[in-house]
Image: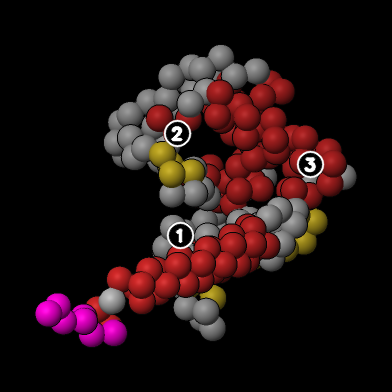
Amino acid sequence: MSQQPPNWASEARWKKIAIWVTAGSFVLLIFLTFDTLSKTSVGGERVRAYSVINQEIDYRFNAQKNRFMPVIGKEAPLFGKVVTETEAEQLVTLGKKTVQSKNCMNCHTLLGNGAYYAPDLTKAWLDPNWIDAANRENLMLAFLKDPVGNARANASGRKMPNLGITDEEAHGIVAFLKWMSAIDTNGFPNNFKTLNAKEQP
């Protein structure tokens, strides 16, 4: 005479549990997806609108949140011209697509993705190696179009090759880098000193 298995060991019980766990996980995944999209969509508190390139951007330590955060300041239009949100989006998109087409992530890191052969570009707009904020845009444009002739200080000794970047593409890349520096990356990179380091702890 066969003995009935205990209730907790029955196949039917575990099938039901599996179905409920799977359904619950699916619902949770949908909720987390929409929650993430709301926090990472352009125009929110973490990922600023493209027109943020019209403003001064810095990166400072926030004692209350105990991490470094972007700080958006006064009006400081890129290339001396205030642009609309649509114009800013077009310029930043051009820069993003150029960075993708030139395979910049083969050497650089952007927002934690890419390679570590060359400097991280997440906060490249704020890099102190540009030395002078007033001439930063021109220095960046010159470097992008002719990295060999306009090389910046690099302790590794590694040099960027000439990628044939046009003037229009260079303007787009600078806009993309400025916009990206305004993204709240949860304190990454940590303890990064900007051109305005004197204002940081």
Q: In which quadrant will I find the N terminus?
A: bottom left
- The answer to whether residue 172 is above or below residue 74 is above
- Look at the picture and state if 193 lies above or below 103: below
Question: Which SS class for mark 2?
Answer: helix
Amino acid on which disc 2 is placed: Met
**Who comes first in sequence, dot 1 or dot 3?**
3
User: Where is 82 relative to 15, above or below?
Assistant: above
Q: Amino acid at mark 3?
A: Ala
Task: Determine whether 164 is above or below 168 in the image.
Answer: above
Identify the mark nearer the N-term, 2 or 1.
2
Q: Residues within 10 Å of mark 2 (few under 14, many from 20)?
A: some
Residue reaching furthest to the front: 1
Residue named by callout 3: 88
> CB of mark 1 within 8 Å of CB of mark 3?
no
Please state the extent of the stretch shown in magenta in the rendering: 1-7
- The image shows residue 4 at horizontal and vertical percentages of 21, 81
Amino acid on which disc 1 is placed: Phe
Residue at image point 71% right, 62% down: 44
Let me know if residue 55 is in the magenta part: no
Packing grade of label 3 (10 A; few <14, some 14-19, many >=20) is: many
Q: Position of residue 180 (x, y in %)?
A: 61, 48
What is the x, y in percent for residue 104? 48, 30
The residue drawn where x is 58% and y is 46% is: 125
Residue at position x 24%, y 78% in the image: 9
Identify residue for label 2: 105
From the image, tell me which residue sits under label 1: 188
| Secondary structure of residue under mark 1 | loop
Q: Residues within 10 Å of mark 1 (few under 14, many from 20)?
A: some
Q: Residue furthest top?
A: 164
Residue 45 in view here: yes
Quarter holding residue 43 = bottom right
3D distance between C-alphas at marks 1 and 3: 25 Å
